[in-house]
Image: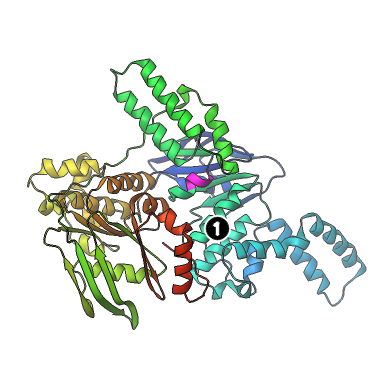
Amino acid sequence: MISANNISLAYGSQVLFKDVNLKFSPEECYGIIGANGAGKSTFLKILSGEIEPDSGEIFITPGQRLSFMRQDHFAFDKYKVLETVIMGYEKLYKVMKEKDALYEKPDFSEEDGIRAAELEGEFSDLGGWEAEAQAAQLLDGLGISTDLHDKLMGDMEDSVKVKVLLAQALFGNPDILLLDEPTNHLDLESITWLENFIENFDNTVIVVSHDRHFLNSVCTQIVDIDYGKATLYVGNYDFWYESSQLAAKQLKDEKKRADEKIAELKSFIQRFASNAAKSKQATSRKKLIDKLTIEDIRPSSRRFPYVGFKMQRELGKNILEVKDLCKTIDGEHVLDHFNLVVNNGDKIAFVGPNQQAKTALFEILAGNSQPDDGTFTWGVTTSLSYFPKDNTSLFKDHVSITDWLMPYAAEKDDTYVRSFLGRMLFSGDEALKDTAVLSGGEKVRVVLAKMMMQEANCMILDEPTSHLDLESITALNDGLIAFRGVLLFNSHDHQFIDTIANRIIEFTPGGIIDKMMPFEDYLHSDQVKAERDAKYGGVKYKLSL
């Protein structure tokens, strides 16, 4: 068990935590959520002992081992991949190195022999004889082939290093496992493997992630960091979100009778608690939810932006036709005779490892880039709004957010513009903030405000969830589900794709796969699997978003 007792931390006038008291129990997985800058990663570092709080203490049950996923990709460059994983169990690794050093001594003494015998016993007790096999098993599960296990970390790509550092954290069955954004840079197969690992993990897991599908799969409880407080909620992310929204809605509706409110809340609890328990996490969540009382359902103080897209004009029959589109970038054919017909009602998610192809296509369709060959034709009834992957060029000038948005406003006055900014959580003087100093997440929210003003019936979004916190991702997700126009988009967010898209287009080395189906159906379709095998030419592939 690990607990935080009266933890407080401030940087200057900014208070991150004040008198935080939490207890994390075995066999539970806790998801840490909070707005960007709320202190989620800092809280993990306090739990790990990497950062000292201003006051309070972290208590860990004596004899228990804590493991924290490291973020330094260069710290282990001189070590081999397999050795780096074993280093995650520091005590075992020290014993192993001391034992090996003794046996390598040219003048091995009787005293060395006694010490070696002691180390052999300790090595065996710590599971040393199975260490290499277990480390290799973790690497294999994360898609790192055996031929890389004896290579140096310095020779690995960043995507491989991330997986090795994750394996390092998981190694040796730690009693307490801390994970900070563990799904970053992982392909879908590796994420699924990690979900299964955590579901079968018997000890305490505390994880920070912006991946809602991951949080919903593995978490039994949610810790919401907000305004210096850390509040514990039962259930996964969806349960926290829906229950807090329902409670907030009821608080606003003062005319509603108390017994009606109770009935509605009881119905909500029953609906979640009766979901089939397909994993240990789901079973644990169900037990916790079954014990909830009406008083336990509390509104969160977290503010969610409002994202809603209206269409100024209805779409006709002809939307978009692309014929034999070709584009070469740095000598690579990223688009090679690409063909596409988009129909009214299509919400198309573009997936696959070739990120460059997706961005190149979107830039061409938005009119920001020219194809080497081929044509594309938008229908006469279409109006387009575009969210670029890189928005740097949009914010070059030193102007206020209000002035930046004014050209897109139907009514050219501050009140109208500020109403959109208020929806996107820019209230009061924040609307006068210089666009040149906006954070990544703030820039995304400003671009989304612009797109809401444009009221287009076709939208292209290139990785819109990057830089956003969970609240903004959820709001955007809901807004795009409700949007009645046509969407072309890509994202690294599994749940985002699955809840929005009704058509999947995957870029493969052998051409595209185009299927009219939701993402989960696409992932589990035998027909799609056969087609993907053929398109990848028999080479083992990992589906990336």
* Count of numbered tags: 1
Q: Position of residue 43 (x, y in %)?
A: 50, 45
Residue, disc 1: 70
- Looking at the image, is 484 positioned above or below residue 321? above
Q: Is residue 40 above or below residue 459?
A: above
- In the picture as drawn, the residue positioned furthest to the right comes out as 110
Please provide percent x and percent y for residue 331.
34, 83
Which residue is at a point 41% across and 21% down the rendered structure image?
263
Q: Nearer the viewer, residue 317 or 182?
A: 317
View extreme (bottom): residue? 331
Q: Which residues make up the magenta segment? A: 215-219
Task: Based on the picture, tell me whether residue 216 belongs to the magenta stretch.
Answer: yes
Whether residue 120 sits left or right of residue 175 in the image: it is right
Indicate whether residue 520 is drawn in magenta: no
Pick whichever, 426 or 186, lies toward us.
Answer: 186
Q: Is residue 389 left or right of residue 269?
A: left
Residue 213 visible in the displayed image = yes
Q: Position of residue 131 (x, y in %)?
A: 72, 62
Q: Local crowd at mark 1 within 10 Å, few (<14), some, or many (≥20)?
A: some
Report whether residue 11 is seen: no
* Quadrant the C terminus occupies: bottom left
Q: Is residue 227 above or below residue 101?
A: above
Q: In the image, residue 290 lies at what x, y percent?
A: 54, 28
Q: Secondary structure at mark 1?
A: loop
- Image side of residue 155 versus residue 455, left or right: right
Residue at the far left: name it: 412
